[in-house]
Image: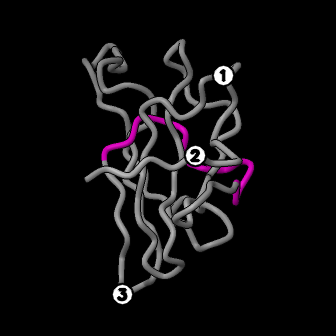
Amino acid sequence: DMEWHHVATAPGDKRTAEGQNALLVYDNETSQTLLFGGTNTGGEPTPSGSTWAWNGSDWSQIASQGAPAELFECATYDGTTRTVIVYAVPGSVNKLNMSSSGATAPVSQTWIWDKTAWKQLQ
């Protein structure tokens, strides 16, 4: 049975429709579900790159910017490192970079959430 919650705080901004196509991932270390990324109504990445946490009863914004804000492939919690890991592809996989040598796919990115900030691995 699905249970509906009426919350005091909701992720995003109605003007930007933040959170469409956003990712949800459970952080076992903090016992919270994280919400981040997504696009606005025009299909552009969310402007703030914010990260929100669901604690079971309400949402709270835990980072105002810095979340990966591109096309995501997947996100998972890594119990060994106790971090959330995101695999992302910049831009759209449908927008290949056409050059004189042919089409090239966007370079993938790996991001880590360390409980306070997002960091892109180099």
Q: Are marks 3 and 2 in contact (CB under 8 Å)?
A: no
The local crowd at label 1, few if under 14, some if 14 to 19, many if 20 or more residues have their Cα within 10 Å, is some
Residue at 35%, 16% in the rendered image:
99
Residue at 38%, 52% in the rendered image:
3
Q: Amino acid at mark 2?
A: His
Q: Nearer the viewer, residue 12 or 68?
A: 12
Describe the element under mark 3 as helix, strand or loop. Answer: loop
Describe the element under mark 2 as helix, strand or loop. Answer: loop
Please state the horizontal and vertical placement of residue 94, each as a whole percent of the image. Answer: 29, 19
Is residue 72 covered in magenta?
Answer: yes
Query: How many discs appear?
Result: 3
Q: Which residue is mark 3?
A: 80
Query: In which image quadrant can residue 54 be found?
Result: bottom right
In the displayed structure, does residue 1 sit left or right of residue 71?
A: left
- Relative vertical location of residue 18 with respect to residue 41 in this rendering, above or below: below
Instruction: Please provide the residue range marked out in magenta.
Output: 61-73
Please state the horizontal and vertical placement of residue 51, each as a whole percent of the image. Answer: 62, 52
Q: Which residue is mark 1?
A: 16
Q: Nearer the viewer, residue 24 or 4?
A: 4
Residue farthest bottom in this picture: 80
In the displayed structure, does residue 25 sit left or right of residue 15?
A: left
Residue at 41%, 66% in the rendered image:
26
Describe the element under mark 1 as helix, strand or loop. Answer: loop
Badge number at residue 6: 2
Indicate which disc, 2 or 1, sits on the residue closer to the N terminus. Answer: 2
Q: How many angstroms separate mark 3 from mark 2 (CA)?
A: 35 Å
Q: Amino acid at mark 3?
A: Thr
